[in-house]
Image (spheres, rainbow, N blue to C red):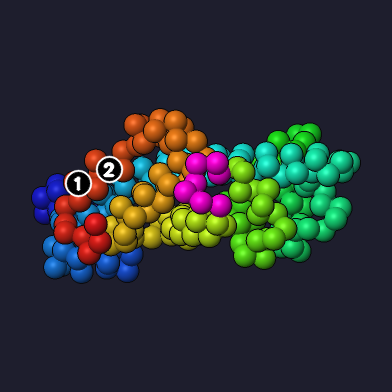
Amino acid sequence: MSADHHTTEAVFAAMSRARMANYLTACDGDETAALELYTWNSQVSAAFWETLGHVEVALRNAIAARLQLRHVHRRRTGSWLDDHHQELDPKARHDIRKARNRVRKKHKPVSDGQTIAELTFGFWRFLLAKQYNTGLWPDLARGFPHAPDKARHTVEHPVKRLHEFRNRLAHHEPVWDKPLAAYHQDDCDVLGYIDPAFAAWVDKNCRISDLLLSCPVTRPHP
């Protein structure tokens, strides 16, 4: 048994044949080619994680800043996270309680900044949902000053797609056969709606476009 074959067998054993089945099918059963595709899938997933990290931080900061201004303009006491007027749905309020509990467990001060950092991408995604169209959205829209229009769905739709894609990445699922160029465009769009200069900086340092040109198989989507 060659060293390369031994390595391939070791990887397939560690990853499991069931996990590698998607890659084997794409490569007509060629184990070496499947392993190459698996490696590429890992690389492009990591590249997307980098860019999605920028998207998530910029998105939460944009939304949180608008909600804080909204809170101040309405002359309300405390923090918008307290939601004394119950403008957030029960799930969002539950998420805030959980975030604050995580901050306490880390023995950190339960500040707005620490709490916001503990809230998930899903929390921010659902603040863009239809149920907030007449409540929060008129204020949140100002957090996306470079969007082509003020329609809520203009921002919600790419954020929703990115949230779903992020969940695939989090579970280490195959993404090589997904519309990766479209997801990358969603990244660029959301960041551009917030601040084109920041979007340009992220894109300059992003590895995704180069990786999309180097996939070892022909993908079903661009």
- Left or right of 118, for residue 46: left
Q: Quadrant of the N terminus?
A: bottom left
- Residue 110 sits inside the magenta stretch: no
Q: CA distance from mark 2 to mark 1?
A: 7 Å
Q: Say if 218 sits above or below 107 in the image.
A: below
- Residue 148 sits inside the magenta stretch: yes
Q: Say if 213 sits above or below 169 in the image.
A: above
- Left or right of 120, for residue 92: right
Q: Foreground: 17 or 179?
A: 179
Q: Quadrant of residue 218?
A: bottom left
Q: Residue furthest left?
A: 2
- Label 1 sits on a secondary structure element that is loop
Neighbour class for label 1 at 10 Å: few (<14), some, many (≥20)?
Answer: few
Q: Foreground: 158 or 119?
A: 158
Q: Which residue is mark 1?
A: 213
The percent coordinates of residue 84 (x first, y second) are: 86, 53
Residue 9 visible to an observer of this rendering? no
- Verify CB contact (< 8 Å) between mark 2 and mark 1: yes
What residue lies at 60% left-to-right and 42% top-to-bottom?
Answer: 143
Q: Quadrant of the C terminus?
A: bottom left
The percent coordinates of residue 148 (x first, y second) are: 47, 49
Q: Which residue is mark 2?
A: 209
Q: Residue furthest front?
A: 149
What residue lies at 14% left-to-right and 68% top-to-bottom?
Answer: 28
Tell me the kind of residue under disc 1: Leu
The percent coordinates of residue 138 (x first, y second) are: 67, 52
What residue lies at 55% left-to-right and 57% top-to-bottom?
Answer: 151
Residue 140 visible to an observer of this rendering? yes
- Left or right of 162, for residue 34: left
Tell me the kind of residue under disc 2: Ser
| Magenta-highlighted residues | 144-150
